[in-house]
């Protein structure tokens, strides 16, 4: 076991399939524990990505929709989007996003200020709100 610290964090983000090492690129805390079985799981995930992600329709998300199909209601949507631009404010960030059918603004708390122009993002469980209310 490689005990890097005594505190376990809730998430660790690793580079993708072409990574030369297993150093994380982000985590919820600078202290974390990462054991041998965790490295084994990371290798399994990378192998799966290489095998299945390039195949057409290999990933299925039952709530996935296109921006042109969104309506104001109580349903939740999932979107795969490209960040076209963003504006930062004191308490929030506005992402200008698009898919192949439409574009819109995505308002988020300042905490989510880690996407940049041209990033591809998947957002889940989005509710479309009436801007007038």
Image (cartoon, rainbow, N blue to C red):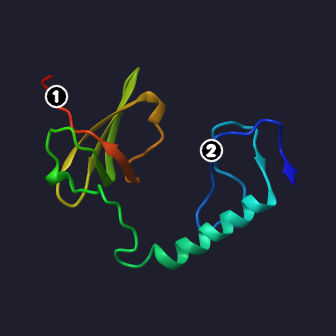
Asked whether the beta carbons under mark 2 and mark 1 sit within 8 Å of each other, the answer is no
Q: Is residue 127 above or below residue 56?
A: above
The percent position of residue 80, horizontal first and vertical second, equals: 33, 56
Residue 79 appears left or right of 51: left
Q: Which residue is mark 1?
A: 131
Q: Which residue is mark 2?
A: 11
* Mark 2 secondary-structure assignment: loop
- Count neighbours of disc 1 (C-alpha within 10 A) and say few if under 14, some if 14 to 19, many if 20 or more: few
Q: Quadrant of the N terminus?
A: bottom right
Q: Residue at x 40, y 21 (%)?
A: 91
Would residue 73 be found to the left or right of residue 39 on screen? left
Q: Name the disc covering residue 41, or none.
A: none
Task: Identify the secondary structure beneath mark 1.
Answer: loop
Q: CA distance from mark 2 to mark 1?
A: 33 Å
Q: Quadrant of residue 11?
A: top right
Instruction: Choose between 122 and 93: the one closer to the eye.
Output: 122
Residue 116 in percent (x, y) is at 42, 45
Q: Earlier in the sequence, mark 2 or mark 1?
A: 2
């Amino acid at each position: 076991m490689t005990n890097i610290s005594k505190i376990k964090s809730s998430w660790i983000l690793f580079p993708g399939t072409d990574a030369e090492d297993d150093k994380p690129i982000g985590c919820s805390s600078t202290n974390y524990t990462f054991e041998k079985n965790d490295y084994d799981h990371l290798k399994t995930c990378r192998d799966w990505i290489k095998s299945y992600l390039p195949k057409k329709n290999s990933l299925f998300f039952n709530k996935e929709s296109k921006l042109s199909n969104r309506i104001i209601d109580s349903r939740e949507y999932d979107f795969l989007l490209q960040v076209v631009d963003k504006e930062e404010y004191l308490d929030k960030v506005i992402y200008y996003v698009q898919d192949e059918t439409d574009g819109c603004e995505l308002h988020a708390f300042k905490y989510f200020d880690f996407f940049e122009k041209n990033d591809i993002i998947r957002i889940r469980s989005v509710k479309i709100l009436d801007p007038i209310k």
